[in-house]
Image: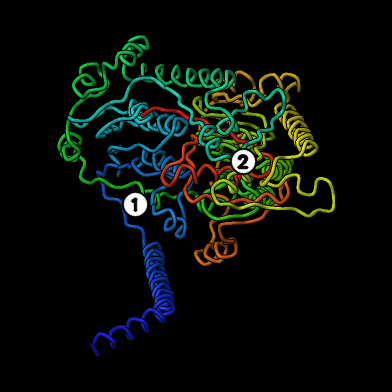
Amino acid sequence: MDEKMTNNKQDKKFRGLSFGKIMLASAVGTLIVMILIGLFKLVVLLGIVGSSSSETEPIAAESFLKIDLTESIPERTPGDLEAILSQTEGTGFSDILRGLDAAATDNKIKGIYLYLGSTYTLSWGKSEELREALLAFRKSGKPVLAYADGYSQQGYYLVSAADSIYLNPSGLVEFRGIGAEAMFFKEMLDRLDVKITLIRPKNNSFKSAGETYTMNHMSDANREQIRQYIKSIWGHVTEKISETRNISVERLNVLADSLSACLPEDALQNGLVDKLCFESDISTTIKEVYKGKKIVEISKYHPTIKNNINVKERIAIIYAEGDVNIGTGTGTGVYSDKIAKALNDAANDDNIKAIVLRVNSPGGMVTASEIMTHAVANARAKKPVIVSMSDVAASAGYEISCNATCIVAEPTTITGSIGVFATLPELGGTLRRYLGITTDTAKTNTNSTALSIMRPISPRALELMQRNVEDFYTVFIGRVAKGRDLDVDFVDSIARGRVWTGLDALELGLVDTLGGLETAIAIAAREANIKTYRVVDYPVKETLWEQIMNMRKNSSGTLAMTSENIPTRPTIQPSTPLMGDGVWIGGNAVIETLTRICETQGLQARVEFILITE
């Protein structure tokens, strides 16, 4: 009995103090874990800095240069901090191109080995550019070999430029033509009682980015433009494959229609691949057939390339990759202040004779694109500015390009989408229905709360926003007409938010010539009237400490209040990245969709599209 009473007292004592003790213990434990994680990251940082400062290893004679295309490849080789945050130490696309160019005349390099594994990360634009670089490399007489456990259509298009294509005996070649599939959230938002108002110029029927929230199917205009650009890409792709694999375009389409070249034996029999083998066999082939003594990763090779370091005259490459955003920021993104500063710095540097602006962006905030468009015009007044379009340079990505001296695009580049839209969410019903949260207002004027996300937009505010999008569209087509020396009415007829491939854009006058980054650099040298030059990358890479301090300076939590064009609209930073084709991966689709809606503030000039190819 006494023992039972003692236990009861101890239980009561424990229950009375347990919450506080548990909270304290949790807080202390969390703090210790955070300190340990911080120390671990610091050790990793120091390790990377130490390793990056070590001397470059010499390249052995009789080497094959291996290009691994299974990991995401940014336009530019990431710095130390970027590599840690993105968990990649891969070589940037521009350095891969430079590596291929140097390897063609490097006596130590006997050939190229393309490894695609089971995943291939490049889209049509970069696939086109790398393919052309491989064809140029082959003119040296050195072989290009390619291996994959399975080829996506973009991957196969790339390796169709190789001398020999190898496939895993159990792999697939997904050769079936290009299909597009868009995702729509309207019915989900209806169930959540979320209401979306889409505002766009009255004639911008092709500006379909906001339709994903307001419709449950493709609009006729959107279906028309998608059909056009996938047809353009597929026509170009089959023509080029036909040239290098000696299979007629008609035959290629028969194979795609019937899926007759997808299985390994079928792909071999129909001439899409040259041999079925395993990856381990490639090393043997390189050694015995091509007399290669070593396989060297491109990441080890590109630092050894000499870049005319003593040459005074230079061409600056400014990288604009990702969504267009206002201000400065860390990670992948086209941040207006960063790009404008890079343009200004390059324009005012007497050693910089020309600028190449490398654009890979689906667009984004209008205010940000306006800042960069103005900076491009100012830079062009001082020296040639050549735009090199990568996978996509559309909407705001096209606006910042249109004032350049010359625009270079790949045939498969997605561009155009000259238009604008705004989406205004109303979440009051959602919060009331699911969380029991309501709001009330006190205001000084009739429309003080007209743009609140908690209630319907007022008629006057809607009228104002409609005028806003109409006015900017007029400005947009005016900028394009002036920059491209085209009639405003003609620009309006081909604009209206419509997406074009680089091939179609060339015929319309929206771009000047077809090609990649190397083509743009050559044009820049010609425009600047220089023959010997050094290529330098902008923005200039910050030191590791500067990156850390800027990251700390720009960190502002997950919820921020902004006032760009649409005042006091909250913006929530997304927890998972948005793929270039408009599909969210990972996380909760509902949360991601609401996040995307809430973060889309101000006028937007962006394109979202989906190419289903694998």
Q: Which quarter of the rendered picture does the N terminus lie within?
A: bottom left
In-image side of 281 versus 210 (left or right): left
In-image side of 136 versus 521 (left or right): left
Residue 314 in sight from this viewpoint: no
Amino acid type of the residue that numbered disc 1 sits on in the rendered structure:
Lys
Mark 1 or mark 2, which has the lower sequence index?
Answer: 1
Position above or below: 278 against 270 = below
Position above or below: 543 against 216 = below
- Viewer-side label of 1, 2: 2
Q: Nearer the viewer, residue 83 or 506?
A: 83
Q: Quadrant of residue 93?
A: top left
Q: Quadrant of residue 292?
A: top left
What residue lies at 38% left-to-right and 78% top-to-bottom? Answer: 15
Q: Quadrant of residue 126?
A: top left
Q: In the image, residue 469 lies at what x, y percent?
A: 73, 34
Q: Which mark is residue 300?
A: 1
Assess disc 1: are there few (<14), some (14-19) or many (≥20) residues with their C-alpha within 10 Å of its C-alpha: some
Mark 2 residue element? strand
Q: Which quarter of the rendered picture does the C terminus lie within?
A: top left
Q: CA distance from mark 1 to mark 2?
A: 36 Å
Q: Residue furthest bottom?
A: 2
Residue that numbered label 2 is attached to: 364
Amino acid type of the residue that numbered disc 2 sits on in the rendered structure:
Gly
How many numbered marks appear?
Answer: 2
Q: In the image, residue 139 lies at what x, y percent?
A: 36, 28
Q: In the image, residue 282 lies at what x, y percent?
A: 19, 37
Q: Residue furthest front?
A: 1
Q: In the image, residue 580 lies at what x, y percent?
A: 49, 37
Mark 1 residue element? helix
Assess disc 2: are there few (<14), some (14-19) or many (≥20) residues with their C-alpha within 10 Å of its C-alpha: many
